[in-house]
Image (cartoon, rainbow, N blue to C red):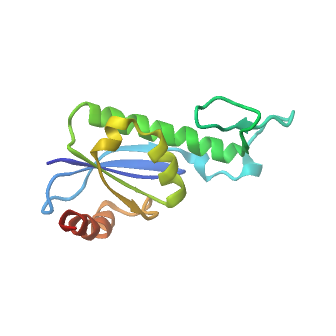
Amino acid sequence: MKTLIVVAQRDGARLYEWTTRAEPLRLLEELAHPEGRLREGDLDTDRSGASYESSASGASSAAAGSVSATAHLAVVFAHRVADRTDHALADHAFDRLVLVSGPRFLGLLRDELSNSTRALKRHEIVKNLGHASARELKAHIEPELLFAAHA
């Protein structure tokens, strides 16, 4: 069985393949998003005071709360990561999906995944491991995945 492991945070994501415990994680793709490191004041926003509107359907509404430019960028990047994940799984190259992310970005990513991709999700690991090496990442997640398999 091949597992796709998606490690994501606001400033980037990495997609790994994991086949067996004996094998190291294999980096498939890295998605950079340097804008994710910016703070609100660093962004060139609309001078007229316009704000992004957020709603479940993606359409703006008067009842929807406004979101900051940095939050909007995070949603846009979560959509990009989810789209790439959906495509990887649609090609039937993987049997399972593991998401690794901090709580805020994990929620955004989960919301952007297609239903068929969500169905393949085996596990979520709520940790910020975006800057960990492949070896460190495997050491962090392997015990949790093995525990989940026996639970």
Left or right: residue 48 versus residue 151 is: right
Q: Position of residue 31 (x, y in %)?
A: 44, 43
Please tell me in which quadrant of the rendered image residue 47 appears.
top right
Direction right: furthest residue: 48
In the rendered image, residue 135, in percent from the top left (x then y), is placed at: 28, 65
**Which quadrant holds residue 94?**
top left
Q: Tell me: residue 93, above or below residue 134.
A: above
Which residue: 77% across, 33% down? 62
Quarter in which the C terminus is drawn: bottom left
Q: Nearer the viewer, residue 131 or 55?
A: 55
Q: Residue at x 74, y 38 (%)?
A: 63
Percent position (x, y) of residue 1? 14, 48
Identify which residue is drawn at 52% across, 53% down.
105
Please tell me whether residue 56 is drawn above or below residue 40 in the rendered image. above
Which residue sits at x=73%, y=43%? 65
The image shows residue 55, relative to residue 21, as above or below, that is above
| In the displayed structure image, the side of residue 72 where residue 89 appears, left or right | left
Q: Position of residue 95 (x, y in %)?
A: 20, 43
